[in-house]
Amino acid sequence: MGCGNNHNDLRSGNCVCEVVRAIKDIQDNATDPVECAECSSCFMEPLGSLVSPTRRDPVDTRVFVLSNEEGEPFHAFFSGENNACVSIFFRVEDVFDNCCATLRVLVPGRREGGNFVPVNLLTNGRVDLGKVCQVERFRASNDCITVDLKCFCGVQCIADVNLGLCM
């Protein structure tokens, strides 16, 4: 698994690794948003730029999705709640060695009556992309996964949120 012939060549660099490193740096240097940006990108600074520029709530996480060379989202498991136990959404906790990373698995959810309700992303044992569209909120799980970032071909930043992890 990998993108291109040089994904194991440490001298060639890896764009997914560099993006995740940038997300980690941005999270570590979280500040209030000060500028309005026209296009969202994982490289948007400061943390909070992916949300409304007038938002005053502090944010501590840039939520992202990783995909393989077929464009399918990478998924991981979290301790189940309300029949939901799989997520494609992550927060970077650490990047180390040659593009390895520890990712916190985020619980996908939606708002119902002001409450957080987990969204079960699975249908017949597979991630259902239609259910991904129901996700509008995230909550931190206690589950983390260590990955080799050289094994992914895409990274898409989804939102800047406050998970209350950096207080």
Image (cartoon, rainbow, N blue to C red):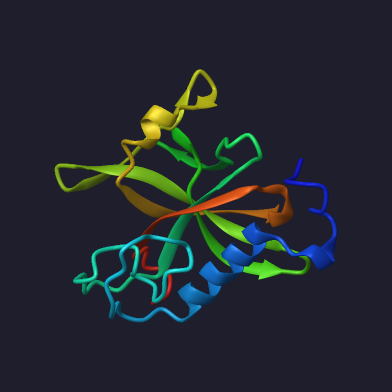
Task: Please tell me which residue lies in front, 60 or 5.
Answer: 5
Q: Quadrant of residue 68?
A: top right
Q: Residue at x 14, y 42 (%)?
A: 113
Q: Residue at x 71, y 69 (%)?
A: 96
Asked if residue 57 shows in the view, the reply is: yes
Q: Quadrant of residue 52?
A: bottom left
Please determine whether, in this image, residue 165 is positioned above or below residue 4.
below
Left or right: 58 as drawn, with respect to 45: left
| Residue 12 % position (x, y) | 79, 64
Task: Please tell me which residue lies in front, 136 or 4.
Answer: 4
Please determine whether, in this image, residue 122 is positioned above or below residue 61.
above
Asked if residue 82 shows in the view, the reply is: no
Quadrant housing the C terminus: bottom left
Left or right: 38 as drawn, with respect to 147: left
Q: Residue at x 84, y 55 (%)?
A: 8
Residue closest to the far top: 124
| Residue 143 % position (x, y) | 55, 52
Quadrant housing the N terminus: top right
Q: Residue at x 82, y 53 (%)?
A: 6
